[in-house]
Amino acid sequence: MSSQETMKFGYVTYEEVVPIASEFAKYLEEGKIMGNRCKKCDTKFLPPRSGCNKCFSTDMEYFEVKPEATLRGFTVIHFAPESFSDKAPYIVAVGELENGLSVLAHLVGVTSMPDVGMKMKLVPQKISKDRIVYKFTKA
Amino acid sequence: MDDDIVIVGGGQSKFGKRKGLGIRELAFEAVSDLMNDFNMGIEDIDASVIGIAGEEFSGQGAPAAVVVDEIGMVGKPTIRVESACATGSAGIKTAYGWIKAGFYDTVMVVGVEKMTSVSSARATELMARAGDVRWESPYGCSFPGYYAIMASAHMKEYGTTKEMLSSVGVKAHHYGSLNPKAHIQKEVSLEEAVNSIPIAYPLNLYDCSLISDGAAAVVLTKASLAKKYTDSPVRIKGVGSGSDTMEIAHRKSLTSLSGAKEAARRAYKMAGVTAKDIDVAEVHDCFTIAEIIATEDLGFFEPGQGGPAALDGQTYIGGKIPINVDGGLKSKGHPLGATGVSQANEIRNQLLGKSYNRQVEGAKIGLSHNVGQSGQFVNVMIYDRV
């Protein structure tokens, strides 16, 4: 891929897009949420990391994460950071997936106040030509 | 004991929207205040530790150097420390370690932040970047947002209510109204607080700490040298620290800060005391839920009981454990780098019986709890009279 085609994760990019992040974004574009695991000690990471923080091996392999999730906590952002001012209000949620993996993402498609413990799905969504995120939706 | 570390001086600027004052003037004001109550001069201090959380607010790169110059400490060893909102206590811990190591006898710690020269939306943006910028900040989670997520989990798990949250803000404003150095000196009713504008559900305006300018300073030395500086040293009896995952999603619990529990465990152990021995505490109430969780993590209340205890008035003077009776971050204000130093000052004043109309009578042992980001840095300190 040329640098112009690099898929970026998130609504805003604050740092240099490193390979582990652009690979993750590319998988999202294919509809897959990919964590990775350390081949030496089996520690699992989501989002993926370039090395294992338990044994410092960099021999990692990807695995696909099932989208089923449970809501652990959420907020409705009314007063947003400057670069999100035009998007408020929006819901930011933390959801637990399989194997104790857990991520933060927007929760969309809910019409009433979410209930902690509710079942959700984590789905990739392209938000512009070169940007993609995952979002929670009601299961 | 001779090698105990004691605080022999403290000073603080007025906190607030201090138009016309930069970090150097704020730091100068705090150090001047300290000097009013200090038997020696600036020339009797061997080194400085400068706590400033971010240069983006003040506009000055390497901002510690201008502070060192302004407060007359040029030529002596110095360092800038940063641990987000726990910067001030990180500074005190650094000075403590320097003296224990034998590098210097007497060290000044100055914490300062100039935050109001940028808009609130910009300040919210800058603070949101203290979340994980690769995986979490790109969703626009504000700083109140991270604590709001914890609040929603706490409400679900323990039945904590918005009223309980608001009651923490009401107390903060009550004591802030009695503190001439507080950013806001105004009482707020529970009804006003519960119905104030939403910032990040379930947190309203009166659940969130202020964006403030301010500075605070302390001088630390060995107990054996304390007499030169003051007749009333306050000992730092215990210091404990902890940390936590960068991504909030990776926490095992969203209703407690594991780093705070670890910091408390270490501080209590070093001081040889338990939660029951604490007479007065300063906890990091960047948000009302943060105070409720802090009172549980520190062992003042059982998990889930922090909310009901707050609503019941147990954290007022006369209650089980007076908390943040200077107004806390909520009403006194939260200039990031200054906060941890200001907490130490308040506990020092309380133990010396100098807190006037908000004095906890007979306070002998105090505690401060200073949290950086959403728990990534935590320092807990325990203090007593020597």
Image: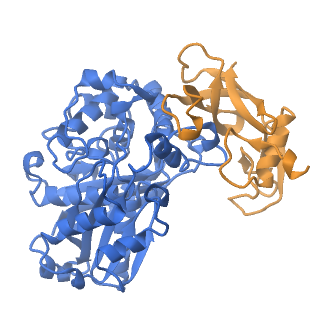
Outermost residue, top side: A111
Tell me the residue at 15%/70% (across/down): B386
Q: Is residue B364 shown to the viewer in this render? A: no
- Toward which corner of the image does residue A5 lie, by quadrant? top right
Res. B8 visible in picture: yes
Name the spot of residue A89 as percent of width and height, x first: 54, 25
Instruction: Out of B282 and B124, give the one closest to the viewer.
Output: B124
Residue drawn at the location 84% of the way across and 41% of the way down: A26
Which chain is the one coloured orange? A
Which image quarter: residue B1?
A: bottom left
Q: Nearer the viewer, residue B292 or A82?
A: A82
Describe residue B216's horizontal placement relative to residue B80 as left or right.
Answer: left
Residue B305, image x and y in percent? Answer: 33, 32
Determine the residue positioned at 68% across, 59% down.
Answer: A54
Tint of chain B: blue
Residue B30: x and y in percent read 24, 64
Q: Is residue B227 left or right of residue B204?
A: left
Q: In the image, is residue B75 above or below residue A2? A: below
Q: Nearer the viewer, residue B315 or B61?
A: B61
Q: Is residue B276 left or right of residue B209?
A: left
- Report x, y in % for residue B74: 35, 82
